[in-house]
Image (tube, grey):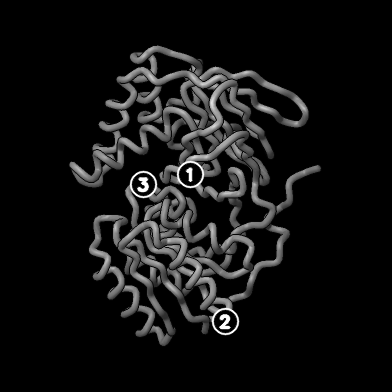
Amino acid sequence: MPAPDPSAAAMPVLTGREPFFVVINAGSGREDASQARETIVRILEQAGRRCQTELVRDPARLPEAADWAVRQAREQGGVVVAAGGDGTLNAVTQRVLGTGLPFAILPQGTFNYFGRTYGIPADTERATRAMLDAVIQPVQVGLLNDRVFLVNASLGLYPQVLEDREAYKQRYGRSRMVALWSGLVTAWHRPRQLDLTLLQDGRARMLRTPTLVVGNNALQLEQLGFTEADLPRQGSLVAMSPKPVGTFALYWLILRGLFSRLGEAENVVSFGFQEMRVKFRRGMRHKVAMDGEIFHMDGELVFKVAPLPLPLLTPRHVDPADRA
């Protein structure tokens, strides 16, 4: 059976009077969170729009804050807003998806793949103003064992790279160069290989690889060098996996990704799918990453497209520079 077409789902209609309920992650981005909150409130109040904010200093409280925003938006006919990096957007989306509530984002992370895909500015003031003149777009969301991911989900080496990257950021600050350096250091310690069985449409595929990454974001894949034919289509996700290689070959793959040539690499397998089950030859507990956040899951993993789209507020007028 074909995957549902998100564009066919009924989307909420904006009246231009909805209040905003904003969850702000104090640990995201380079901008001071209190200053970001002042900017958001000032712009919304100047526009005559009601808003309430929740500044979250402990990331473990993000789900609780998201529940608050969803509850308020339901009761008052409002919009749920997440301000932070892709991990923050993921945590709030987990609570918003399926409610039918309109959802807006104010990107404040290092890479901001999700926001850039839809031309949402990384600058808080510009993003808030764009939110006031937005249209709702149905956006596809991926699921891993019923947890959402907006950009990608992965297992094996990639989650370890992300975990180590966070430690480097704490020590050296948030930047793309710090992220790259931490990835190279992690890859230097030759990763163990995963023995996987991938089940799709009743067919089994055996795969031995250091990591499996499932992408839901065309912009990230384009920047890695995948062609239009390789990008996720409506109702599908894309799996990417390097074949077992040595440390220097793994470095070469990382460099190819940096220069947007990874999609051409002979040692990388990629394919699209609607739903895929992943079984492990050994081990029952697995470290996985979703939009940069680390989780642990037991047993079989199931990747699929969420049956309902996310009603995302996107700018009516997009500056191409905000997609770069």
Q: Nearer the viewer, residue 301 or 158?
A: 301
Q: Counting residues from the N terminus, which is met first, the one under dot 1 or under dot 3?
A: 3
Taking 155 as reference, is 208 above or below it? Answer: above
Numbered tag placed on residue 138 in the rendering: none
Q: Residue at x 34, y 20 (%)?
A: 251
Q: Is the residue marked by circle 2 packed among few (<14), some (14-19), or many (20+) residues within 10 Å?
A: few
Q: Which residue is mark 3?
A: 111
Secondary structure category for the residue under label 3:
loop
Q: Which residue is mark 2?
A: 75
Element type where label 2 sits in the image = helix
Three-letter residue code for mark 2: Glu
Q: Residue at x 51, y 78 (%)?
A: 72
Residue at disc 1, secondary structure: strand
From this viewpoint, which residue is outermost toward the bottom? 48
Mark 3: few, some, or many residues within 10 Å (few <14, many ≥20)? Answer: some
- CA separation in Å, label 1 and label 3: 14 Å
Residue 290 is tagged as 1
Q: Is residue 16 left or right of residue 174?
A: right
Side of 218 relative to 203 (left or right): left
